[in-house]
Image (cartoon, rainbow, N blue to C red):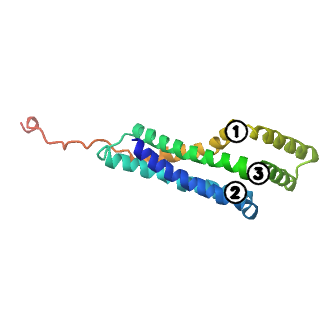
Amino acid sequence: MTRVVLIFGLLAGAVLAVMMVVQTAFIDEIGFDRGEIIGYTTMVIAFLMVYFGIRSYRDNIYGGVISFGQAVGIGLLITLVASLCYVTTWEVIYYWFAPDFIEKYGAYMVEKARQAGATQQELAAKAAEWGEYREMYKNPLINAGFTLIEILPVGIVVTLISAAILRRGRARAPVLPSTASRA
């Protein structure tokens, strides 16, 4: 199981990491709204590896049979490996290459509220809220926690869908007519 989980988890993690690096490098050109769409789309695409990992496990290790629970377990492990790659990549990017990201995103959110017609008091509250986030993001564990919360639900949903699609019980023996019913 470890081999399958690592192969498919690291493949998904690589897709997530590469896309995060590219997206962060071009966030000023892409914009935060499109960045979110691209980010979550990439997550779904990367988590297709969960489907293929469960299928590989079912077909090559379990002889074509897997229960929903077993499939969920394998899918969650693949999701965990991929999510850890995602979080690790973000930690490196944030602390070494884009330490001003939270300030830029906070300014974007305040401007978005301004365009939506927020009052001066609401704008001040929004700016204060992002100031709190900036302080929280200085702690690598809190930063990692927020990042994990961002990706894990996507992986869990893909895991549940994949497990439901791929579950396959043991083949049943054909039912033969009994001789007692002929009498």
Q: Which residue is mark 2?
A: 24
Of the residues under marks 1 and 2, which one precedes in the sequence? 2
Kindly state the secondary structure of the residue where label 1 is placed.
helix
The correct choice, above or below, for 18 with respect to 130 in the image is: below
Of the residues under marks 3 and 2, which one precedes in the sequence? 2
**What amino acid does circle 1 point to?**
Pro
- Horizontally, residue 89 falls left or right of residue 123, namely left
How far across and down, in percent of the image, does residue 53 sit? 42, 49
- Which residue is farthest right? 120
- Which residue is farthest bottom? 29
Kindly state the secondary structure of the residue where label 3 is placed.
helix
Kindly state the secondary structure of the residue where label 2 is placed.
helix
How far across and down, in percent of the image, does residue 160 sit? 48, 43
**What amino acid does circle 2 point to?**
Thr
The residue drawn where x is 75% and y is 41% is 137
**What amino acid does circle 3 point to?**
Phe
Mark 1 and mark 3 in contact (Cβ < 8 Å)? no
The residue drawn where x is 62% and y is 53% is 40
For the residue pair 149 and 80, the one nearer the viewer reads as 80
Q: Which residue is mark 1?
A: 140
How far across and down, in percent of the image, does residue 161 sit? 48, 47
Q: Which residue is mark 3?
A: 101
- Which residue is farthest left? 183
